[in-house]
Amino acid sequence: MKFLDQLLRSNTQNQSLLCVGLDPEPNRFPLKWRGQSDKIFDFCAEIINATADLVMAYKPQIAYFSSHRAELQLERVIRHIRDVAPSVPIILDAKRGDIGSTAQQYAIEAFERYGADALTLSPFMGFDSIAPYLKYHDKGAFLLCRTSNPGGDDLQNQRLSTMENNPHLYEHIASLANGPWNTNGQLGLVVGATYPNEIERVRQKAPTLPLLIPGIGAQGGDALATVKAAKSTERARVIVTSSRAIIYASDQDDFANASRQEALKTRALLQSS
């Protein structure tokens, strides 16, 4: 099944636009596991068990695993998602951005070693930096476009003076992703919830591409404004990510139930838009 079909199936089955980010920090684990990096799988598995019927996707962030030498635990986490929530796609958040044989190896890592359904990429080395991933015809790739961090202004919000109507760089990326770069039909864009006006401009450039939108919850993005700005002809083309606000809803033994309650609340808010 192609990635976009997986999104549609998951959206329909769980009635959800919510993607839960898995960013395990042992120093923020429940008190019983606090500081124990060997409990990364256990922590993530409890979150997954509690939210599997509420989410549209999961988004493990690779650095939170590799920094603790927990790549094997990441493999277990992904297998666990397959077992508990087989219809929920997995977006590996790695923001890779190299070219040539190195990009090929990153693609093998994401899609063959970990078995992810999609991957986040940095497109700033041009089409060469995403082409190896597009050879996986059923897999998705989300290109950084207008990110939620303030430093995104340094490049993404600059205008291209040599082009007609002087589009911003992020608008040009959206146009490329919507057009000549989308050779496998599975490209999407990363746009931050903290910039709803820019999300609306991206949606104008890319009317049907899936938008992966971090920044609600701990980063302060307005969930309703986000979904309104990102709306497409298909609701399955909007994927709103919340990580810390959900997975760290409690540091007590009830952390899994607390994460479920926060996910329920967030899902309902997104669905109401």
Image (spheres, rainbow, N blue to C red):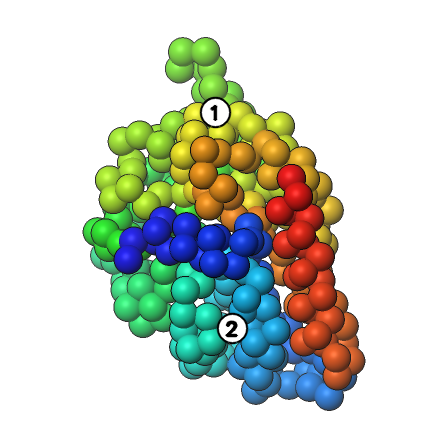
> Any mark on residue 204, and which?
1
Judging depth in this view, the residue of 103 and 118 nearest the camera is 118
Marks 2/1 in contact by CB < 8 Å: the verdict is no
Task: Pinpoint residue 7: horizontal percent, then vertical percent.
Answer: 42, 52
Residue 247, image x, y percentages: 66, 68
In the rendered image, which quarter is residue 180 located in?
A: top left
What percent of the width, then of the height, locates residue 196?
63, 33
- Residue placed under numbered mark 2 in the picture: 65
| Of the pair 13 and 253, the residue shown nearer to us | 13
Tag count in the figure? 2
Q: Nearer the viewer, mark 2 or mark 1?
A: 1
17 vs 178, left or right, is right
Name the secondary structure under disc 1. helix
Residue located 47% across and 58% down the image: 13
Residue 109 visible from this viewpoint:
no
Circle 2: is it few (<14), some (14-19), or many (20+) Cα within 10 Å? many
Q: CA distance from mark 2 to mark 1?
A: 36 Å
Query: Can you see residue 54?
Result: yes
Q: Quadrant of the N terminus?
A: bottom left
Q: Amino acid at mark 1?
A: Gln
The C terminus appears in which quarter of the rendering?
Answer: top right
Give the residue type at disc 2: Phe
The answer to whether 42 appears left or right of 268 in the picture is left
Label number found at residue 76: none
Depth check: give the residue in front, 44 or 7: 7
**Relative image position of residue 113 (x, y in whole percent):** 31, 72
Image-based side of 134 in relation to 12, left or right: left
**Mark 1 Cα shell of 10 Å, populated few (<14), some (14-19), many (≥20):** some
SS assignment at label 2: helix
Q: Residue at x 50, y 30 (%)?
A: 202
Labels 2 and 1: the sequence-earlier one: 2
Res 109 quadrant in image? bottom left
